[in-house]
Amino acid sequence: MNRRELMRTASALALAHLAGLRAAQAQEDPAAYPTRPIRVMIGFAPGGSTDAPMRVLAEAVAKILGQPVVIENKPGAAGVIPTQMLQAAPPDGYTLAIAPAGVYRLPYTTDIKWNPASDLCYVIGLSGYAFGTVVPASSPIRSLADYIAYAKANPDMLTYSSPGVGTTNHLTMEQFSRATGVKLNHVPYKGSAESLQALLAGHVQSAAETSAFVPHVESGKLRLLAVWSDKRMARFPEVPTLKELGIDIVQTSPWGLVAPKGTHPTIQARLHDAFKQAMEQPAFKASLARFDMEPDYRDPAQYQRFALASMKKEKDILDTLGLSRK
């Protein structure tokens, strides 16, 4: 047998072993779940406003379930890589993912063969981001009016970073550009931590970010020009909303935990109950408060209804912006 045949045989044996392992895992008694470590994939880099609270939550859930809960960062592609990876994962409750809003626009921007609303098992809604536009504290841009004026005077020259192409941050800035008649230069990164570091290092002039900006604004390194929520942030009551400034945009972005389609209802319920108990603990609430976020609980049925409504909303936005592929 030559080398190529040996490699083919080895690959076939490995695939057969993997298939057998998945089948065996799927046959585990759901009532005994969990019997080994659980991994939760996050589509953003470490240190951001998704990663930090989830690590606190994972620690609490590990104590409740009696098994380690391991966070794995899979940054890029607007945070949706983990949910795509779930499509090939066994529905045994040991591979989970955080679903950001970008998941619900995938069918309209990417050629995928699965439906986010029906091909994921919705476990629990956990929280939602706060967003805003920030510049360095040393920037001559001191208000959103200054920002717009500079952009109009320098078309395509004013740079802003975001956690990636196709993220809620990016698409909201596209809406902002059209609403204000400005042309901006988008510089995408892999997650909020990288995006804000680029701003702090002077590689870009501004950032469209989640509330991961909070520590940097509080330390005096960044200036918050406007928030995208319906109301002002309690931490920065002097900073106006986009709506207050005459720009009809309100943006929030709830996120939560999902599992592969076909996950046994007993396992889904076990996960839901453990994460719900953990998200009610002071440590998780404190980790969210660090980024001016709050718990935003949804049970499995509520979370799936939210997914269906979000898909419709995302399609409407993308159609309006002319960015939908369909």
Image (cartoon, rainbow, N blue to C red):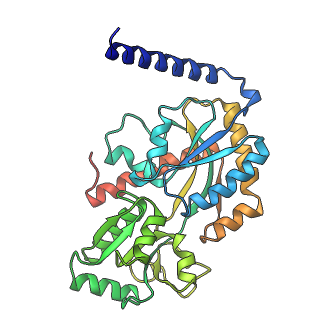
Coordinates of residue 132 in the picture (x, y in percent): 47, 74
Q: Quadrant of residue 182?
A: bottom left
Whether residue 248 is visible here, answered yes or no, is no
- Nearest the viewer among 12 and 148 is 12
**Side (left or right) of 257 relative to 8:** right
- The residue drawn where x is 30% and y is 74% is 159
- The number of callouts visible is 0
Coordinates of residue 260 in the picture (x, y in percent): 55, 35
Look at the picture and state if 150 lies above or below 288.
below
- The residue drawn where x is 55% and y is 63% is 47
- The residue drawn where x is 70% and y is 34% is 36
Q: Quadrant of residue 185?
A: bottom left
Q: Quadrant of the C terminus?
A: top left
Q: Quadrant of the N terminus?
A: top left
Coordinates of residue 45 in the picture (x, y in percent): 49, 57
- The residue drawn where x is 50% and y is 64% is 252
